[in-house]
Amino acid sequence: MTENVRIFIVEDERRIARFLQMELEHEGFITSTEANGRRAYERILQEQFDLVLLDLMLPDMDGLEICKSVRKLSDVPIIMLTAKDDIEDKVNGLDIGANDYLTKPFAIQELLARIRSVLRNHRPESDTPEGEILVVKDLVMYPARYEVKVNDEHVDLTKKEYMLLEYLLRNKRTVLTRDQILQKVWGYDYVGDTNVVDVYIRYLRAKIDEHFGQKYIYTLRGVGYAIKD
Ligand code: CA
């Protein structure tokens, strides 16, 4: 049952992450690792993992926060790994939707047994396919149904605004020039003013950054725009 099963190891201690990766791959699992909490959250939603091993204390976003946020959008199995034998963490972990938890240090055989048990019991919600999801901070785009939400609140965008936002999201953390944006969103044959890009960036900022009071779209003066966390 380990064939093609993808496990995401979220752990900021490199030594532990490497150990887990080695042991799990030895068992035939496919693994990916991530040390940063914020990035881990985004990757859990964007990449199709079969199970997540989630450390509790992480930089930028802790395991409880990640689990809580992921559960609003996905039922991917999560096993929390807590560093201390803290009963409150255990209760919290299960309260916020983790499938299981394990206290460090643990025997690898114990972890493997928990992983198999969680995988066995997990029934994917095949009747509600969300399809692909693009995420940056609290903003989520569902390309399959042309929908954008921030903090679970629907954002009403025009077609061009949506296309511009999707282009930025698909190139997250990359600065895109006005020319690149113009060609991608307005097309090669567009003959109007290049200021149209700045105008639409303003529209997006009004509906997203300003409306929700959080910065998403960054300007690199003289170069272009980027969306990032
Ligand atoms: Ca940690």
Image: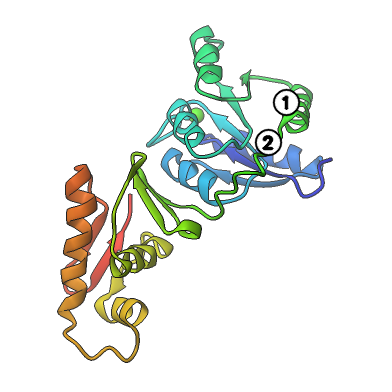
Residue 3 drawn at (x, y percent):
82, 47
Q: CA distance from mark 2 to mark 1?
A: 10 Å
Provide the secondary structure element on which disc 1 rests. Answer: helix
View extreme (right): residue? 1
Residue at point 49% right, 9% down? Answer: 88
Location of mark 1 (residue)? 111
Residue 141 drawn at (x, y percent):
41, 53
Instruction: Say which label, 2 or 1, has the lower sequence index.
Output: 2
Note whether 133 is above or below 41 in the view shown: below
Note whether 196 is above or below 168 in the view shown: below
Residue 16 drawn at (x, y percent):
61, 33
Q: Which mark is residue 20?
A: 2
Mark 2 CB near ligand 1 (8 Å cut): no
Provide the secondary structure element on which disc 2 rests. Answer: helix
Specify the amino acid type for callout 2: Leu
For marks 2 and 1, give the one nearer the viewer.
1
Indicate the quadrant containing the N terminus: top left, top right, bottom left or bottom right.
Answer: top right
* Mark 2 Cα-neighbour bin, 10 Å: few <14, some 14–19, many ≥20: some
Q: Are the residues at dot 2 and dot 1 in contact (C-beta closer than 8 Å)?
A: yes
In this rendering, would 96 be left or right of 114? left
